[in-house]
Image (cartoon, coloured by chain):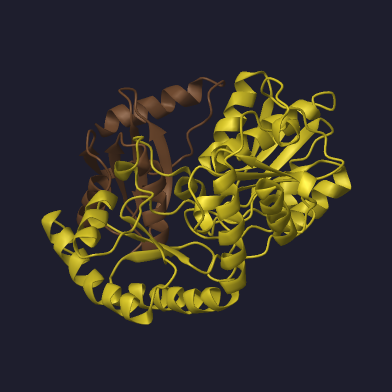
Amino acid sequence: MLLDQARSRIASLLSVRPDELSFTTSGTQAVHLAVLGALAGRRRVGRHLVVSAVEHSSVLHAAEAHERDGGAVTTVPVDLYGRVDPAAFAAALRPDTALTCLQSANHEVGTVQPVAEVAAACRAAGVPLFVDAAQSLGRVAVPDGWSLLAGSAHKFGGPPGLGLLVVRKGTRWRSPLPEDEREGRRVPGFENVPAAAATAATLEAATAESGAAGALHRELVERIRAEVPRLVADVEIVGDPVRRLPHLVTFSVLYVEGEAIVTELDRLGFEVSSGSSCTADSLRPSHVLEAMGVITHGNVRVSLPRGATAADVDRFLAVLPEAVVRLRRSAGVTS
Amino acid sequence: MRFRRRRAAEAEQAVPEPVPVPAGPPAYLVLDALGRKCPIPIIMLAERIREVPLGQVVAVQADDAAARTDIPAWCRMKSQTFVREEALPQGGWAFHIKRDY
């Protein structure tokens, strides 16, 4: 009962039918099931998968699993802003293409992808498109035309450990996991009912306030984008200047280690992230920054929380230049 | 050092199979940043490119994979010309940058 209610409320926000929506145990599981299930469902058509170079690692890991299993993967490159070219994406389609994957917006640099154009090209070719909408649900509407979609509740303020998987009617899909009767035979195991109910409430709230919150965030991010290069020498703002998520802004500071600047900003009371290699688990820098061809060190990602104010941004802009000067001096940079 | 580089280039030209290394002037200055993590190779490049006359090439040797993205990106930001990346036999790469101003 509670579960059905949560399902219809979320389905209505996503403009899909309730029976097209399944709850998963995380956004990552939703992505894995969407990608591997759609590939399994279209195995007779072929085993070719198309992904953008800047997909979330959960999509790329599913693609790697497909490749290990004998499938073929084409990676579509992005421009300096991290955006795919819809024509290049369409050109990657082959007669044996089983599935294409494109995120709604990038998780590291905030660039919004041309989902509508790519969906139209895929539709014309009869190939299903999977959209990883984890970054934009509850913030920006997802364009129509896709066949599968995944989301993650904690990204829009919901409980951790709950993901959303949508498989539109008419989309061929077969579970890559052993049979289980739950969630329309799409997700094994018992549903997390309280989390599903909480997710419905938070997605409703986030969607309702996305207009006002988005406008404020957009204004604050615009200020950071304009002021950081003016206040700090040798900085590059990364990501699309216009077609982007409202709350996310990323820049790279030359000659500074990502980890050092994250630690310093944390000490000053700002929790930021970084795509620089030294802050991640791996030794490799972020595949997103690499694919864009932008500076990977000194990377700072500011994700404005709900309730961020102009005063917070002013304080950030007040402490950043001094912090960078200190770090550069300690690294022995003389210029 | 420079002789060895030229011989290596000639040897590669003699063999038709491998991908040909794009032609470029030999490096005027070679910076050894092998074993150093980014951003150190970029800091070394930024500090020492001024020792190279205009139009000449500085080569940065580095084995941090981040340099493969960061050095071309630095050249784009700083309006210097990224000439080419060359794999080193001992591992890592030599990145060739032409000083434009």
Q: Which quarter of the rendering shows the C terminus of chain A? A: bottom left
Residue beneath the point at 42% across and 73% down: A307
Residue at position x 72%, y 41% from top?
A100
- Where residue A157 appears, as percent x and y from the top left, is 49, 58
Picture coordinates of residue A260 (x, y %)? 22, 52
Residue furthest to the front in view is: A1
- A253 or B12, which is in the foreground? A253
Chain painted in yellow in the figure: A
Q: Which sits in the foreground, A43 or B45?
A: A43
Find residue A334 and report its horizontal and vertical position in percent. 14, 62
Residue at 58 percent across and 28 percent down: it is A64
Where is residue A160 shown, x and y percent of the image? Answer: 48, 46
In the image, taking residue B86 as reference, residue A127 lies left or right, namely right
**Residue A253 visible in the displayed image:** yes
- Dividing the picture into quadrants, the one containing residue A128 is top right
Q: Is residue A75 left or right of residue A214?
A: right
Mark yes or no: residue A54 visible: no
Q: How many numbered callouts? A: 0
The one of A318 and A309 positioned closer to us in this rendering? A309
Position of residue A100 relative to residue A223, above or below, is: above
A217 left or right of A169 in image: left
- Identify which residue, B62 or A191, lies in the foreground: A191
Chain shown in brown: B
Rendered image quadrant of residue A179: top right
Q: Quadrant of residue A187?
A: top right
The answer to whether residue A29 is above or below residue A317 is above
Above or below A166: residue B79: below
Residue at 36 percent of width and 78 percent of height: A227
